[in-house]
């Protein structure tokens, strides 16, 4: 599980992502326990979503999550698939 917390949005992009992160957390607390461990990937798709949203914000985080969910199908081998790091900011002088 990731160390990202709902209580620690570090940037504006993190604050804007909080409602979506909250929805994923609700899924993790309510629906996921009923389904049992079914994810072929590490970290799980829901943990990936929380990390992607926290790290990259709503737009890119959602895009990364949708891409990950698209790779989660019966013919997938799964495996380790971490959220990419943010690219360093470039200064425009």
Image (cartoon, rainbow, N blue to C red):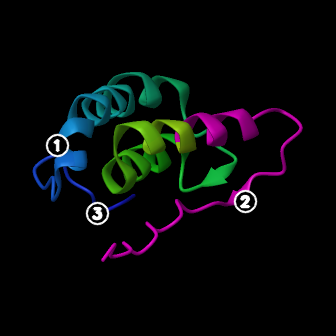
Q: What distance separates the C-alpha of mark 3 from that of mark 2?
A: 20 Å
- Residue 79: which numbered mark, if any? 2
In primary-sequence order, the first of circles 1 and 2 is 1
Say what secondary structure mark 2 lies in.
strand
- Quadrant in the picture for residue 30: top left
Most distant residue in the right direction: 75
Neighbours of disc 3 within 10 Å: few (<14), some (14-19), many (20+): few
Q: Nearer the viewer, mark 1 or mark 3?
A: 1
Residue 87 is covered by the magenta coloring? yes
- For label 2, count other residues whose C-alpha is less than 10 Å away and answer few (under 14), some (14-19) or many (20+): few
Residue hosting label 3: 3
Residue at the front extreme of this rendering:
93
Say which quadrant the N terminus sits in: bottom left
Asked if 64 appears above or below 51 in the picture, the reply is above
Mark 1 touches mark 3? (CB < 8 Å): no
Would you say the residues marked 1 and 2 are in contact, meaning their CB atoms lie under 8 Å apart? no
Is 13 left or right of 81, judged from the image as shown? left
Is 84 within the magenta? yes
Query: Upstream in the sequence, badge 1 or badge 3?
Result: 3
Q: Which residues are magenta?
A: 65-93
State the SS at label 1. Answer: helix
Q: Secondary structure at mark 3?
A: loop
The residue pinned by badge 1 equals: 15
Q: Please name the predominant secondary structure of the magenta segment in the image.
A: loop
Residue at x-position 43% and y-position 66%? 86
């Amino acid at each position: 599980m990731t160390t990202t917390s709902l209580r620690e949005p570090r940037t504006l992009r993190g604050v804007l992502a909080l409602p979506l992160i909250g929805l994923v957390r609700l899924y993790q607390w309510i629906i996921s326990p009923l389904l049992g461990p079914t994810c072929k990937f590490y970290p799980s798709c829901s943990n990936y979503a929380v990390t992607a949203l926290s790290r990259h914000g709503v737009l890119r985080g959602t895009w990364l999550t949708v891409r990950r969910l698209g790779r989660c199908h019966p013919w997938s081998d799964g495996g380790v698939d971490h959220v990419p790091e943010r690219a360093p900011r470039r200064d425009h002088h």
